[in-house]
Every structure is written in structure tokens, then in C-alpha cells.
Image: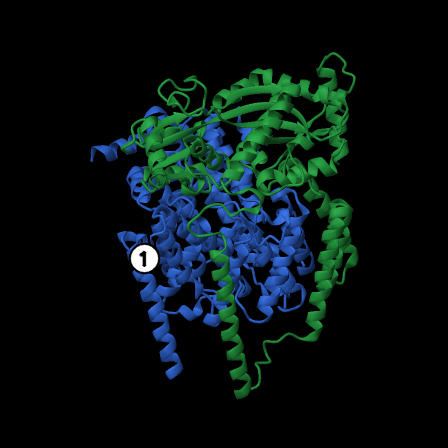
Chain colours: A green, B blue
Amino acid sequence: MLFWVSLFIPTFHAIANEQVVEQWQPEYPLVITVPSNPGGGWDQLGRFLQRSIIQEKLSPVSIEVVNKGGAGGIIALAELVSTFDGNPYKLMVTGFGMTGATIMHNSEFNLQSTTPIARLTGEFQAIGVPYDSPYKNLDDLMQAFKVNPKSIIWGGGSAGGADHLFVNLLADKLGVNAQDINYVAYTGGGEATAALMGGQVSAGISGYSEWGGVVDAKRVRLLGISSESRTVHPDIATFVEVGIDIVFQNWRAIVAAPNITDDQRQYLIELISNARNSKTWQDIVKRNNWQDSFLIGDEFTQFIIEDRQQTRRIVELSGLGAGGEGYAYIGPYFFPYIAGGGLLLCSLFLLIGHYNNRQETNPVASDSISIKSLNKFYLSSLTIALYLVSLAYIGFIYTTPIFIPVISRILGSTSSKRDIIVGAILTVLITIVFENFLNVIVP
Amino acid sequence: MDSFTNIFTNIANGFGIAGTPENLMYGMIGVLLGTAVGVLPGLGPAVAISLLLPITFGMEPISAFIMFGGIYYGAMYGGAMTAILVNTPGCSSSVVTTFDGHPLAKKGRAGTALITAIIGSFIGGTFATLMLMLIAPALVELSLIFGPPEYFSLMLLALVMVATIGDNSLVKSLFATFLGIGIAMIGIDMQTGTARLTFGLPELYSGINIVLAGIGLFAVGESLWVLSGQENKDNSQFDTSESKLSMSSTEWVRSGFAWCRGTIIGFFAGILPGSGGTIAAFMAYGVEKKLSKHPEKFGHGAVEGVAAPEAANNAAAGGSMVPLLALGIPGSATTAVMLVAFQMYGLQPGPLLFQNSGDLVWGLIASLYIANILLVLINVPLIGVWSKLLKVPSGLLYSSVIVFSILGAYSLKGSISDTIIVFVLGLLAFTLRRFNFPIAPVLLGVVLGPLIEQEFRRSLSISTGDYSIFFTRPVAVTFLVIIALSILSTIVKQLRKTKT
């Protein structure tokens, strides 16, 4: 199914596209892996890039986007570096957050293990305070933070992310000890903004484009932005202006698998460059309030190396590197201990109850399960386990038509022929629906 | 009075904008699509909308939003359908619906359960939209009072209120709750970035979220339960004849009250960022059971047990639109994706949106009403069709449930490891059921545990380690007092029970 679709589209596009013949041309669809779940900044970058390439007919083959989230992107990174080594059809969205995650979790791989293609966008960090906050300008806030760091409660994204690391960078430049930073992590920019407006935290830190409406509505005052000069907004001071030497961008980029040939790398760089220069892309960048921080080739490679060095330093300062537990009033293991303690206590009660009951009467036998049904349970569990294993190694399309009749049989179905036919039809239907309509590539 | 006539002309205007045949068609597509993703475990409205984003790029904003509204409401209802019919909730917010919805279906009253769910969804969604139209800005100000200590005490209250939901022993319920909290602690800690209880496996770094837990504990767990022949799944016992679709007049009355209470609870839970449909449904169910004259009927097919949570989760969906439109603050995954959609059209939700793009806002509000009406119009005639699902031979039905569950888990991140997590959770659920432990509190622990933890730690971070923050803020204190009273009353009741 996959091959049929992919071979059809290339021929169509190849005719429509009169490009100078490159030394290397892709023959199969290119896959952009988004290393996060749908709906975040990386996801947007991947999907809008896909859109630009398709809209402007830049690629002779189709472009697919798949999400592979988890662990700040290092799961997708590991896949790209190990499984797809030398595969020119695999691209991945990446960015500052991934650099941070690889350092924080001591990942075996980092961005230097990949083939850098192009840095596409960047977002400046901006600091906001409630509109009626006593801090009316950046200098006031920075002085207060410097003199009495604990008096400023920062609200932003999760620990180790761009927001958190930026506050640590700020503290470092001001000579504030990382342990004195009072940072409250929220799931997303939205929750942090609500906390800021409600006066729960004293200053908020977020990407500039995420602030939006609350600033126009005079609920939040933006005091500082991490750009070099006042290019983004004339009224917002830069850190450089108040004598803090910080220019920072939360950058997002595209990388390819390691060990691809120079031809292939050149082709991909050209493809992404064309997409970036297209009107569709420029339009998208504007609409999303992103910065166009385009950088390709060796300069981008160099940037990745430098960025990693700088980030490593901040991560270590923040106490997060190499399995550190960071600085929080209540440590990360407080609640797991409560849960564990609760479980132990309950088990104790249950044991005592069980013991008392046994002395009085026989255990309630009616609830217990017959041996026959337990055997059935083991059998079906084993079937499902086998199914999962073969899913990983053989694939969905081949294993499911077998799986469905087998399970059906366990449940006492007598008509094997019907089950096999239904299983086959269902498999085909599911594959078509998931791959073509839901954009999920079945294993 | 003047402002009300204003609202009236505005909304009439909005209906004019949203009610074109083309938009109605998009709304219909949205409802159908939403119902479909709601039925499929793992896929929720957030994923569906984000997949549609690139496609809607060229559409009129209002057409896109009417479709998104349809998806959001449709998904909430779609999840309930499978919850009632096959005891496998399609979304985590429909888990509560299984408690009484499935027993009703077993009694041959699947139609009744579906009707009360649909009407509940409609009332919940419509009321939330009405409130959004009338008093959105004022409500948002109110919700901003809620800081970490208030959230902490509210979530703790929800946990205490609902932990005793089942008929099982209190200790067993508590055990299951703690187990859920423990499961939720797996993964990277938000406040410090530390990887907890992951045994060095990067696959566990992102933790076991509500979606995975819902699929594993309920869909896979239920399938295993049926597969081992624990329940006589002779489907002929499900009588789905049309005559049983209707409800008796007492049931209408009972549902009526439940819809209203569920709607109000759900709406307020929806306004608070970070709370949401699942918590709303649990709380609504807990309140219904507390208020009912026949609490013993819950869990055995009480219509209130379906009506209240279904009204609540749709009202929560509507409620979460309030902070989104009024302040530009997304309170849930779905509204976060919708915010992206707004920005894609160059619109910035917030107080100024009402002034700058009034036509669009009123069109959007009108489109939410329309999406709600479409939900009923499309799904009521389909009740009979869906009830036929029960006529599918159980072997095929449950093997498909397993296949869909596994694919749903896989689709979240495209990783086989998630399918293994789901399977292990299914085994866990089976084992718990075998020894007569309730499953629902496990999920409740997974949902509320991380919220309680994060808010507790945030509170102490804000107060720089001073515990008095919980006792100096009036809202937080009120909740804590209610918690104390409710625990006390439970203890007294237990003591009386043992004496007699």
C-alpha cells in the first residue's frame, strides 16, 4: 500500500517540476520525524515545512511527517542516529530543547552525531510581569533579582527547558547562585501566564511569540527580550541595554541521519533552502511570529558545537546535569515515597484483614477464578505478547490477519473461515484509514 | 439590559456568519470525525485538530473553527459510546461513563445509556457556550484567584471525594489509588528534570500519561477479562430493540438533575487551566453518588452515573474555551492546539479579540452552538446503528478492541514500547480485578496524583518552604476543611458499621 502511493506521486511531481538534474535524487518519500507529540513548536515546524514543500512543489517525492515524542526528543534522536544510519530519506526536527535534553539525561547521542541540514527559525525569550507589578522596567527587575534572588518567583515551562535554562543563564550573568533561583515549572506557557496574571508568580519567562494577547490587553508588561537590539518590538528593552551580556534564541532546525553522502546532504540542504525561500514559508514564519534565523552548511555545524558547549555549562550550573536533582524545596522523590508508603500501609491492613478472616471463616471462594479460565488468560496474554513482538519485527499488515482469528478462537468462535476473512478485511481497512486519514504509519 | 440586547444582536449576527450551508457541512464533518477519533482509543480531539491544521490553512477561519468545535464535542461523546457498549472508553474522560453505562448496556438498556449520554453532552456543551457568551471575562478573573495552594486543595478534595467510589473495601480502593499515584510518578519530574522510577529506560522518560493508562487499564484490561471467560459474553443478552431506547419518566427526572449538576461542575473544572474533562467527570460522578438516595445502585446501572459525567466532560470542553477566548490561555491539550490555529490565522485570542474581530468571535460562539446541535442531530439516529455493535460476535469485537488499543498506543509516539506499557497495564488491571481490587481509583491516581504533587511543590516553592501558605488563603482553607469533614464522616460511618 505504502509503495503504491509513494511511487505514484513521484512520477506526477517529477513531470511538474523542471529542476536542474541533481547528482542524487530521492526515489522514495522523505520522512520528517517530529521528536515530540502533536501540537508543540517542533510539530508546527515539521508540519509547516511539509506544507511549504508540497505547496511549492519543491520535491519530486512526497513528504511525510511522523511524530515520535518522548524524553525531550532523545528517543527520536537515538532512532535517527542508530536505526537510520546512512539513510538519506530520514530528516528530523530539532532545536535548543534537544541539546538540553541530551546533556541533562546523559544521552549516548547528541546533535553532533547527526548530519546538520539547516537552522530555520528562532524565538527570543521575553520576560513579562503583571501590568501592576512594582517592577516597571528591566533594570528594576534585574537589580531586585541580583540583590535578593529569592524574592523573585519565576514562572515558566518545565525544568531543563528553554525557559528554565534561560533564567539560569541570567542568574549566572548576574552572579546569582543557581540554588537561590526560585523557579516554578508549569506544563505550558498558558498555565504559566495564568499564574502570572493571577499574581501567583512575580515574573514570567516564555518565548516572545507565546505572550500575544495578554500584552496587548495590558494585563502583562513585557520588560525584556533576548534579542541583540530592539528589532522585534521598539518598546521592549534588551538585556544588552541594561548591561547584561545575553543574546539568546530558542532555535529550531532540521537535521538528517549520519553518514549520508555529500551529494545527498547537498540535495537536502538545497531542498530545505528552497522551502525556506518560498513565499509559503515566509508567510508562515510571519503568521507564527517566529524569527527567520536561517543558517546552513558548515556554519550551522559549527553553531551546533558552540551551542552545545554553552548549554552544557548552563545545565550544569542549574544542577540538572548528570543525574543531578536540581534545586527545589520539595525534592523529586517526596511523592513517590508517599505513594510507596501508602501502598505498604494498605498491604499491611489487607494482610491483617485476610489473616483475621481466615480464622473466622473460610476464604470467600466464590470470587476466586477457576483454573480453566486462568489458563485461558495465560493463553491470550501469550498471544498478545507474541503479537506485540511480531508487530515490531514482522509488521502490522502480516500479523493482524492471524491475530484476529486466533483471539476470536480463544473466545469460543466456531467459524474460523469467517474470522479469517473479517480479519483480513479489517487489517486492510485499518491500514488505509490510519495511514491516509490519520497520518499514523502503522508498524 | 442594554448589554443583553447587544449580545442578542451580536449572536444573531454570529449565526448569520456561521450558519451558511458550507459551514454546516464543515461542522458535520467535524462532528463525525470527532466521534470517530473519540471512539478510537488513544486518538483524541487534540491530535485530530493538529493533524487537520495544515489542511485548514486555506479555509475561512470560521469554517475551520466550526469544524474544530464539532471535533471537540464529538470526541467527548464518541468516547462515551464505546465506554457504554464495550466497557472500553475511547478517551480518558469517558472512563467514568463505564461505571454505570456498561451495566446499563448489559441489562439491555444500551439505548437508554446512549440517549442520556447524548442529551447530557448537549446540555453540558450548550450551557458552557451560553456562559462563555454571557460572563466569560468575569469568570476568567475569578479563575485567576486559583494559585497552586488552591489547586492543590481542590485536587486533594476531588481525590478524597472520589476515592471511595466503588463498592469495594476502603483499604482496597486506597491501595489502588496509591498504585495509580505511583504509576504517574514514573518519568521526568517537571520541577527538577530528574528521571524518576525509570530504571534507566529512556522509553519511560515521558512517563505513563492518562491516555496510556486509560487504554491499558480499561480497554486492554477489559479485553483480557473477557478473553479469560470471566464474564459470560453471550451477546444475545444485550437486547437492543428499539422499544428500550426510551427512558421512563422517573429516569428523565433523575437524569435531569444529574445533567444540571454535572454541567455546572464540568464547566467550572473546564475554566481552571490544567484541570479538564477527566477530573470533571470523576467529580460529577462522586457528587451524584454522594447526593443520591440510592448510592448502592451506582455501579449497577444508575442513569445518573451516565448522565452526570457525560454532561460534565462536554461542559468542561466548553469551559476550557473561556480562558482561551478571554485571555488566550489554553487550559487543555485541545485548546492549546486551537490557540495555534488562531495564531495561524493571524488572530490573537484575548480581551482585544472581542473588539478587533468581533464578527469572528460571535461567529465562533454561534458555531459552538451549531456544533452541539449537529452532535445531537447526527448521533441520535445513529444510536440504533451503534447498538448493533453488540451483535458483532464477541471474538471479533474484542480482538478488534485489542488491535485498536495497541494501534492507539502506538500512534501517540510511534513507538512499540508504548504498546508494551499498555499491555503490562492490562495485565495489572486483570490481576487487580482477579483479587477484587477496583480499577477506577488507579486511573484517578494517575490523573490527580501528578496535579496534586506539582501544585503542592509549586506552593512551597512560592512560599519558600513555608507550609502556612495552605492555611492563610481562604479558598484553600475552605477546601481543606471540607476534606477534613468528609474524612471524619467516613470514619464515623465506618465505626458505626462495625459496632452494629
- Residue that appears at 62% across and 39% down: A74
- Residue that appears at 53% across and 39% down: A316
Task: Work out whether A20 lies above or below B459.
Answer: above
In screen coordinates, is B132 left or right of A318? left
- Residue that appears at 32% across and 59% down: B480
In percent of width and height, residue A84 lies at: 74, 35
Furthest residue in direction bottom, as rendered: A360
Task: Work out whether B204 lies above or below B358.
Answer: below
- Residue that appears at 54% across and 50% down: B209
In percent of width and height, residue B214 lies at: 55, 54
Q: Secondary structure at mark 1?
A: helix
Q: Is residue A69 visible?
A: yes
Q: Nearer the viewer, residue A84 or B52?
A: A84
> Where's the N terminus of chain B, which quadrant?
top left
Task: Work out whether A211 lies above or below B296.
Answer: above
Sort mark 1 into few (<14), some (14-19) or many (20+) by Cα contacts within 10 Å: many
In percent of width and height, residue A360 lies at: 52, 88
> Where's the C terminus of chain B, which quadrant?
bottom left
Residue occupied by mark 1:
B479
Task: Work out whether B278 lies above or below B428.
Answer: above
